[in-house]
Structures are given as structure tokens and as C-alpha cells.
Image (cartoon, rainbow, N blue to C red):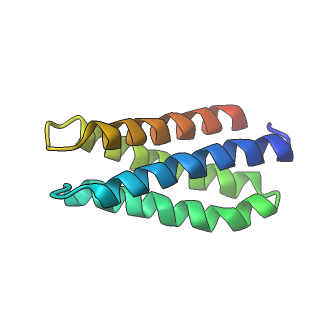
């Protein structure tokens, strides 16, 4: 299990990646609605997770990360489906997915 300081570092990296994806999403025109929805939900869950990080409820943090990982994987799938998505957004989505996977691995 990660120490509180290490968890903050992982969470900050995840928040940054989600912020980058949200910015890239905002810059896109004709973005698939499902992808936009996934990124918006990730952004909202990231904001909600700030309060969890202040506490020490590892189980709730794990559940939230699991939910976010499903959204991250879905966003990654949409990016790879051949729909028109910029390389910048694909890269940002892959970064989010990678950060989520790494954070989850570190918690186990």
C-alpha cells in the first residue's frame, strides 16, 4: 500500500493527465460524443476524489479508481475505433489510462 505522500504524487500525476485530456477535448471539433462524455466524467470524478485523498479510506479510493479505469479504457477504445480524433487527444487519453493503471497497481 502506498504511503499518503506517494498517493498524493500519483494522484497529482493523474489529475494533470486528466486536465491535459480535458484541454485537448475542448480544442477538438466534431469530437465523438462518447469520448467527450468519458473525459468529462473522468474530470468530475477526479475533482470528487480530491476529498477522498484528504482522508485515508483506501477502499473508496480503490473503487473510485476502478470506476475511472473503466472510463479511461472506454475513452481509449473510442480513440482507437477509427473515428476522427487528433493525435494530441489520443496521446492524452493514453496518458490518462496509463496513469490510472499505474496508480491502481501501486495501491495493490
**Residue found 80% across the figure and 40% down from its top:** 6
Q: In which quarter of the image is residue 25?
A: bottom left
Q: In this view, does 63 lie to the left or right of 83?
A: right
Q: Can residue 108 be seen in this view?
A: no
Query: Which residue is rendered at x = 84% and y = 45% of the image?
Result: 5
What is the x, y in percent for residue 100? 55, 41
Front one among 12 and 56: 12
**Residue drawn where x is 47% and y is 37% of the image:** 95
Total marks shown come to 0
Q: Which of 25 and 78 is in front in this view?
A: 25
Q: Where is residue 85 drawn, in percent x and y?
A: 21, 44
Residue 103's spot in the image, x, y percent? 63, 38
Relative vertical location of residue 70 with respect to residue 91 in this rendering, above or below: below
Q: Position of residue 41 (x, y in %)?
A: 42, 63
Residue extending farthest front: 27
Q: Visible in this render: residue 43?
A: yes
Identify whether 37 is placed above or below 98: below
- Which image quadrant: the N terminus? top right
Corner quadrant of residue 54: bottom right
Q: Is 5 placed left or right of 60 in the picture?
A: right
Please report the residue visible at 75 percent of the width from the left and 51 percent of the height from the top.
Answer: 58
Is 29 situated left or right of 107 in this image? Answer: left
Q: Quadrant of the C terminus?
A: top right
Amino acid at each position: 500500500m502506498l504511503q499518503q505522500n506517494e498517493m498524493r504524487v500519483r494522484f497529482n500525476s493523474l489529475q494533470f493527465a486528466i486536465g491535459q485530456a480535458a484541454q485537448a477535448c475542448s480544442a477538438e471539433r466534431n469530437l465523438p460524443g462518447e469520448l467527450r462524455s468519458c473525459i468529462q466524467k473522468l474530470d468530475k470524478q477526479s475533482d470528487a476524489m480530491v476529498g477522498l485523498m484528504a482522508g485515508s479510506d483506501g477502499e473508496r479510493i480503490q473503487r473510485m479508481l476502478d470506476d475511472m479505469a473503466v472510463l479511461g479504457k472506454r475513452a481509449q477504445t473510442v480513440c482507437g475505433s477509427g473515428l476522427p480524433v487528433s493525435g494530441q487527444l489520443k496521446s492524452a487519453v493514453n496518458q490518462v489510462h496509463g496513469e490510472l493503471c499505474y496508480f491502481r497497481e501501486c495501491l495493490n
